[in-house]
Image: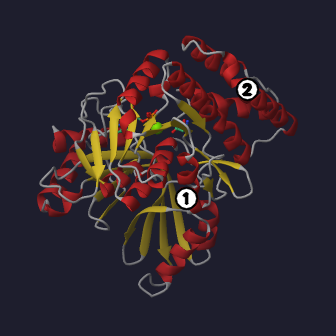
Amino acid sequence: MLVMKFGGTSLGDRERIDTVVSLIRGRLRRKPVVVCSAHAGVTDLLLDGARKAADGKPDLTAIRRREHELLTSLKLKPSLVEADLERLDQMFRGLALLGELTPRSLDQVAAFGERMSVKAIAAVLRRRRIPATPVEADEAGLVTDGRFLRARPLPEAYTNLGRALRRVKGVPVVTGFIGRDKDGNVTTLGRSGSDYTATILGRAIAAEEVEIWTDVSGVLTADPRIVPSAKPVERLTYAEASELAYYGAKVIHPATIQPAVEKGIPVRILNTMDPDAEGTVIAPARGRRGGPRVTSIASKRGIRLVNIVSGRMLGQSGFMAKVFDAFKRHDVAVDLIATSEVSITVSVDDAEGLPAVVDELRAYSKVTVTDDASLVAVIGERMKTAGAGLAGEIFRAVGAAKVPIQAISYGATKTNLQIVVPQGRERDTVRALHAVLFE
Ligand code: ADP
Ligand code: ASP
Ligand code: MG
C-alpha cells in the first residue's frame, strides 16, 4: 500500500487536479490511500473569515465563491459542499454573537477546508471511473491530544485508522491536517499538517512508501524563494529531513518524519508540475554512500534570544537544571543553547509561555531577551566527518557578507550547525552560505 498526499497548490485548479487524477490512476495497483489538503488559499480564507466573524462581521462570500468556482470548473455540483458551508455559516454567526475567537474555534473552522476538498477529489475520481470514498480523519479515529493549533496523535490513532481504512470502498480520500481530541473537539496538527497526516496514515497501514506531492521537485538545497538557483537534494536521512523541517524549511511539516521513522517507511517528495522529476527520497541512513557534506540550508525568523546570567556561579550543579525546568514547566521549547562560565543563551521560537519563564528566572538571575532574531541552520549528517575546513568556510562566508553573528551552536547531533543573526539578515546569510557550499 501507498500513501499519496497532495498539497493545496496541487489541488488549486482544474488543470492540477487533472494531473492528480492521472497520478492516482497510474498507481492503483499499489492500493493508494490519498491525503488531501484544502485547495490553495482556502485555509487562509477560513482563518481570516473566523477573525472577521468574531469582530462582528460574519461573511462567507469569499469562501463560497472559491469553492463554487472550483467545483464548477470540475463540472461538479456546488451542492456537494453545501452542508459544510451551512455549518460554517452557523459557526460564523455564533462567533459574531460571542465576539471572541478561541484556538478551539479556530481549529473547528480551519478543518472545513479539508472536509470540502476530499469531497471534491473523491467525486472527481468517481466521475473518471475510479471508485473512491471521502474520509474525514477525525471521524475515522485520528484521536489527538487537546492542544489546539498543534495537536499530536495519541497511540490509539494508528490502530483506529488502520481499521477504518480497511473498511473503505475504493480509494480512500482522507482529510489532512485534522483530528479530534478525546472530548470530541476538532483539533488541527498545525499549518502544513497534512504532511504529518500522510505519515500517520502511512504508519497506520504499514505503507511501503509515503509520497508527498507538492509544487517543487523535492527538498531543495535552500528555500527557493530566497535562493532561486537552489537544486533538489536527491537523498536525505530522516535526521536531516527532521532538522530541516524543524528549522524552517516549509516544504514539510516538522513532525512529518516521526511516524515514518518508527516503521522505516521511505518518504518521497515529488512535484505535481513535473511528475517525472526524481524528487527527494527521505529514508534511513543505511546504504548511503558518500554524498555531500551539507545537504541543505534552512532559516526561520521571529526567534528570541534569552540570555541568563547567574548571580552566583553558573557552574554550581543545579543551576542549569533549575533554568531548564522553568522552560519545561511553561512548555517553551528551546532550539539552541550556548553557555559560558557565568551565562546561558538559549533561542526560543514559540514565545507564548516565555514571559512566565522570564519572570521566574529573574528571581535568581539577570535575564535579557533579544527579539527580532533569525536562525540559520546548515544541515548534513556528513558534516561530522567533513573536518575543520567546513566550519572555516561557513564563518568566512558569513563574515564576508558582513552579517553579525549573535549565537552559534554545533555539536549536539553534529547534523546541524546553527547560527543566530539579526532578523532581516537571514536571507543574506542563506545566500552567502549557499554560494560557498553549493555553487
Ligand atoms: P503544499 O501546498 O504542497 O503543502 P507548501 O507551500 O506547504 O506546499 O510547501 C512547498 C513550498 O515550500 C515550496 O513551494 C517552497 O517555496 C517552500 N520551501 C521552503 N524551503 C524549501 C526547501 N528547502 N525545499 C523545497 N521547498 C522549500
Ligand atoms: N490546509 C492546511 C494549511 O493550509 C494544512 C496543509 O495544507 O497541510 O496549513
Ligand atoms: Mg505544506
Q: Look at the image and tell me in which quarter the N terminus lies.
A: top left
Residue at 49%, 18% in the rendered image: 13
Q: Is residue 298 above or below residue 231?
A: below
Residue at 12%, 62% in the rendered image: 387
Q: Quadrant of residue 86?
A: top right
Q: Closer to the observer: label 2 or label 1?
A: 1
- Name the secondary structure under disc 1: helix
Question: Where ligand 1 lies, by quadrant?
Answer: top left
Residue density around tag 1, few if under 14, some if 14–19, many if 20 or more, within 10 Å: some
Is 100 on the left or on the right of 331, as rendered? right
Residue under numbered circle 1: 159
- Residue found at the far bottom of this picture: 317
Does any portion of residue 362 appear in the rendered image? no
- Residue found at the far right of this picture: 97
Q: Is residue 342 above or below residue 390?
A: below
Residue 165 lies, in percent from the top left, at 54, 46
Residue density around tag 2, few if under 14, some if 14–19, many if 20 or more, within 10 Å: some
Mark 1 residue's CB less than 8 Å from ligand 2: no
* Numbered circle sitting on residue 300: none
Amino acid, disc 2: Leu
Amino acid, disc 1: Thr
Residue 311 lies, in percent from the top left, at 51, 80
Q: Is residue 349 above or below residue 113?
A: below
Closest to the observer, 356 or 114: 114
Is 413 on the left or on the right of 303, as rendered? left
Residue under numbered circle 2: 85
Residue at 45%, 88% in the rendered image: 317
Mark toward the start of the polypeptide (2 vs 1): 2
Does any portion of residue 400 appear in the rendered image? yes
Residue 29 lies, in percent from the top left, at 36, 36
Q: Quadrant of residue 226?
A: top left
- Name the secondary structure under disc 2: helix
